[in-house]
């Protein structure tokens, strides 16, 4: 996907997140984020938006400290919270849409450029949290297969392409992901010292087949296996659900 496409997706996903949050109300529980209410979700996502925007606007070359990051997540009162989210989201969209494509700033995943990184990361950050907001009103989102496949690639090739983390297995395990609505596929190997990704469907201990949107939600641990076909050893998915955790840096 192009930068402009990611920015357009970020715009739409944020609008839909706000709509769902407004319908649910701040006190509503977020089933996909146990222990969170909608107010917690809005505070988190709006803080992330302001944090991301600051890197681009200030051309920040290094990550913020924990103390500095806290300023982006400083909460406003409940009666201002939804507007605060909308303002931060709009500011992030406008910042990315008007930024110089050659802008240099800190990133934490491989990308063609820092602007490409932030546009993609925030599009998917907001999309997954839109799913959280919609879970509070018993809705399940659907995404265009191209966008969902792009998000799967970012997760597997980006986040889990980095060294370290809890997602390891000895003996090794493997999982193939086969979308039914786009020409794509991934085979993911979870090994004692890390992970390895191969494009396409190869022989694996577990193969999961279904729409890209459903695979996207599953891999982000936002849904069950309804609407998906599982072939093989379900223990691979159990390991994923307990150890596939994400960090920013």
Image (cartoon, helix red, strand yellow):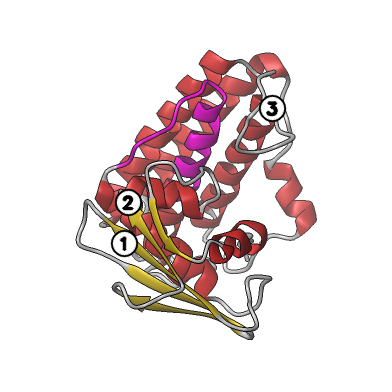
Left or right position of 67 against 211: right
Which residue ends up furthest to the right in the rendered image?
Answer: 67
Q: Nearer the viewer, mark 2 or mark 3?
A: 2
- Image coordinates of residue 128 in percent, x first then y, are 49, 43
Marks 2,1: beta carbons within 8 A: yes
- Image coordinates of residue 4 in percent, x first then y, are 27, 49
Q: Is residue 16 visible?
A: yes
Q: Residues within 10 Å of mark 3 (few under 14, many from 20)?
A: many
User: Which residue is label 1 attached to?
Assistant: 178
User: Which residue is label 3 attached to?
Assistant: 37
Q: Is residue 139 magenta?
A: yes
Q: Nearer the viewer, residue 126 or 202?
A: 202
Quarter location, residue 247: bottom right
Q: Which badge, 2 or 3, is on the more N-terminal residue? A: 3
Tell me where the magenta segment starts and ends, as one range: 124-143
Q: Secondary structure at mark 1?
A: strand
Q: Secondary structure at mark 3?
A: loop
Q: Secondary structure at mark 2?
A: strand
Q: Nearer the viewer, residue 56 or 140?
A: 140
User: Which residue is label 2 attached to?
Assistant: 210
Q: Main secondary structure of the magenta part?
A: helix
């Amino acid at each position: 996907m192009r930068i402009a496409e990611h920015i357009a997706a970020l715009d739409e996903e944020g609008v839909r997140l706000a709509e769902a949050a407004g319908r649910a109300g701040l006190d509503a529980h977020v089933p996909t984020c146990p222990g969170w209410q909608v107010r917690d979700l809005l505070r988190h996502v709006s803080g992330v938006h302001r944090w991301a925007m600051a890197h681009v606007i200030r051309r920040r070359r290094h990550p913020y400290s924990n103390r500095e990051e806290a300023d982006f997540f400083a909460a406003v009162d409940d009666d201002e919270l939804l507007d605060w989210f909308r303002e931060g989201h709009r500011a992030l969209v406008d910042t990315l849409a008007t930024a110089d494509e050659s802008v240099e700033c800190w990133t934490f995943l491989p990308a063609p450029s820092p602007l490409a990184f932030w546009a993609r990361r925030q599009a998917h950050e907001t999309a997954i949290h839109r799913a959280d907001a919609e879970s509070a009103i018993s809705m399940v989102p659907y995404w265009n297969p191209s966008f969902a496949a792009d998000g799967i690639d970012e997760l597997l090739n980006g986040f889990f392409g980095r060294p370290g983390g809890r997602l390891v297995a000895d003996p090794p395990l493997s999982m193939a992901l086969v979308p039914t609505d786009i020409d794509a596929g991934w085979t993911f190997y979870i090994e004692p010292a890390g992970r390895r990704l191969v494009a396409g469907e190869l022989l694996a201990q577990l193969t999961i087949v279904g729409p890209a949107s459903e695979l996207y939600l599953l891999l982000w641990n936002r849904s069950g296996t309804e609407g998906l076909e599982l072939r093989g050893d379900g223990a691979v998915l159990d390991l994923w659900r307990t150890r596939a955790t994400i960090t920013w840096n």
